[in-house]
Structure formats: structure tokens, C-alpha cells
Image (cartoon, rainbow, N blue to C red):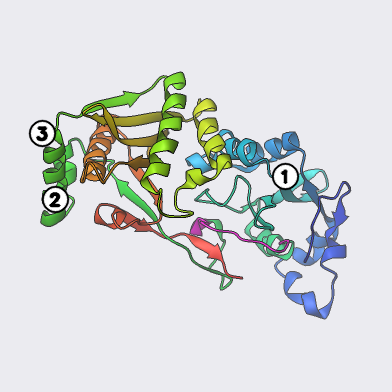
Amino acid sequence: MKILFPHSEEIPLLQLIPKTSENRSFYQNGLSKLIPRLRLKVHSNIDECHKLWEKFSPKQSLFDLWDFRHTFYKGYQNTPYFFTIYNGVNPVCFLPLTYDYENKRYEWFGSDWHEENKFYYNNPILFSLIKAIFPTPLELNAIAPESLPKPDKDFVNDDPQYVLSIKNVDTIESLLQLFNKKRRYNLKREYQRIQTMSPTIEWIENKEAQLKYILKLKELSLARFLEEENISAFNSDDHFECSLNIVKEQGTYKIHILVITIDNKIAGIDVIAIYKSNYYLLEGANDIDNFPGIGSFMTYLEFEDAIKRKMGLINALQEDHNWKHKYFTARPMLKLAQ
């Protein structure tokens, strides 16, 4: 189905999914009587989208939060397209999308940077109708498997998300015991080696100071990948705006920035978000050429900090980057196979 622009009027679902032999699979499990009562409306008004999000979002993770998603809307300025099915005046399911004009495709609201994405419906039997109104071209990534009412061949494995449960961990030593001997030794070795350099360790909590360090993070990231193209996310000015917005809009979630300075030179910067008992390693950069092992040093400090804050889960997000598998458990994510 190609729906390229929002509709100001509601469209009868019976018009989109007529009761024909080709569509007979839709008219099962009670849907035969329900479909004639349903209407589709596509919302692009941001206030209307906000209300829908608040109605359906479980607010379990950082990525469930309107405040966090909205920071990316402000950064990328892509039009939202919330495909919503109504039963009378009541929304019963919706698909929160945006249109990426650069890549010419629909994707999750907030951009494809987000994870633990979900489909929203009041009843699992409605999921087949959500699929029926998928616009094209469409790319849906990092879908939480529990969002599907049952396994579906149209959804395949995406890059996993890397998480570490620390719910019952009281000390950094207890946490280290969860790793095998070699990894435990290597992490402690790098931590102790960087400590001999007398690093200055700062946890930046002030919002104004955090904004200044986002600029320094951009500079550090671009310098780190100076000779490589399209690797630093900060090659995009829009991404930089999103990172600033993440700091500005904190409230429901909190931002903490770890800064390591050695010999008056910034060795590493990491941005962490905290929501409920979840500790998210959002983004960072380090000067590994001048300070090899700085990444492990910062990981050790973040493990220690998360334990002190009595967090339940450390979430390192997707993409292994050749290190996450050493300490984290891979949690499956799905994507739409097209």
C-alpha cells in the first residue's frame, strides 16, 4: 500500500482492505464484524501525535518517552506520520512513523537511531491490520520482539542490544566476578594503568556545562575519525542538534556526562541517560591514539557508577563495536524484512 501524505479525513478500513477472496485472511478472529467499523487517519500535527503517544506508550524504557523521541523530531525536523486506526472516536492501534526525506523512506518516529521500538494496539488481533496499512518504502529496525503478538516471518533478527543486569550486584568486585578470568583481568589492568596517569575524573551534572561538553564530544569524535568517512555520527549537523536537545529536554530522564582529562587533554567523553533503574550508554568518543585503554577505563567507571546509583540494568544499545560482547548479554531485536 502506498500512502505518501497524511489524510485530513478518516478513511474507512473497508476501503483499504475490501472483503475479497484475496483479503480473506484479514476477516478472521472476529475481524469480519470489526473491520467495517474501523477508520484510518494519518496524523502529522505534532500535538495530536503527542496525545496518541501518551495514550499508548508503556513508558518502560527511555525510548518509550515522548520527551526523548521529541528531541530527535526537533533535530531532524522530519514530518511525523502517525497511522492510526479508530473504532468510532477511540484510537485502537497506531503506527508512529516519520518520513526521512534524505533517505526517502518511512521509519520510526524519532529516526532509526532509536531502539526497543514497538507496535501499539489494544488487542493483538489488530496487528494484522497494522501490517496492512504499512506505507512504502518503509524501514523498521530495532523492534522489541515482545511487541509482536506472535512470531512473524516478515520480521528477522536485527543487531542485538547489549545489556547487563546488575540488579543484585552491590560492589564493582562482585560485578567483575560475572566476567571470565581473562576479561576481568584485562579490564582491571587497563583501569589501573590509566590510574597511574593521574586522570581527572568529572561527572558533569549541570545542564549548561553538559551542553558545552556536547560540543567537545563532537570535536573529539570528528578528530577520532578524521581520516574515515561517514563513521562519526557528528558528521551530521542534525545529529549534533539532537545531542544538544537530549541535554536540554531532560527531566523525565536524566543526563550524566563522564569526562576524563589527562595532562590537560580530554581523553574521553561519554553521555549516559538514566531512566527509572536503567542506565543507558548513549554515545561517546575517546582519544585512543594518545591514551590506549581509555575506553576500558571509562567502562569500569560507568560500571562502578551504575552500581552506586543502584541501577538494575546497564544498556549499551546496539552494535557491538568489537567490545560489548565481552561484558554484556545480547538481547534480540527484530527488523522488518523487505
Q: CA distance from mark 1 to mark 3?
A: 51 Å
Which residue is farthest bottom? 21
Q: Nearer the viewer, mark 2 or mark 3?
A: 3
Q: Are marks 2 and 3 in contact (CB under 8 Å)?
A: no
Q: Quadrant of residue 46?
A: top right
Magenta-drawn stretch, dominant element (helix, strand or loop): loop
Q: Which tag, 1 or 3, sits closer to the chain's start?
A: 1
Residue 1: say if magenta. Answer: no
Mark 1, residue position: 79
Residue at horizontal 54 percent and vertical 63 percent from the top: 335
Amino acid of disc 3 = Thr
> Would residue 41 appear left or right of 310 to someone viewing this image?
right
Provide residue 23's location: percent of width, then percent of height.
78, 75
Residue 64: x, y in percent?
54, 42
Range of the magenta residues? Answer: 134-146
Q: Would you say residue 46 is visible in this rendering?
A: yes
| Percent coordinates x, y for residue 331 in the rendering | 39, 57
Q: Earlier in the sequence, mark 2 or mark 1?
A: 1
Depth check, mark 1 against mark 3: the one in front is 3
Badge 3 element: loop
Report which residue position mark 3 lands on: 196
225 up-or-down from 105: above or below: above
> Hey, what amino acid is under mark 1?
Thr
Distance CA(mark 2)–CA(mark 1): 47 Å
For this rendering, which residue is in front, 79 or 263? Answer: 263
Asked if the residue at tag 1 contacts the one at tag 2, i.e. Cβ–Cβ closer than 8 Å, the answer is: no
Query: Which quadrant: the C terminus?
Result: bottom right
CA distance for labels 2 and 3:
16 Å
Residue type at tag 2: Asn
Position of the N terminus by quadrant = bottom right
Are the residues flagged by discs 1 and 3 in contact, CB closer than 8 Å?
no
**What residue sits right under mark 2 in the picture?**
186
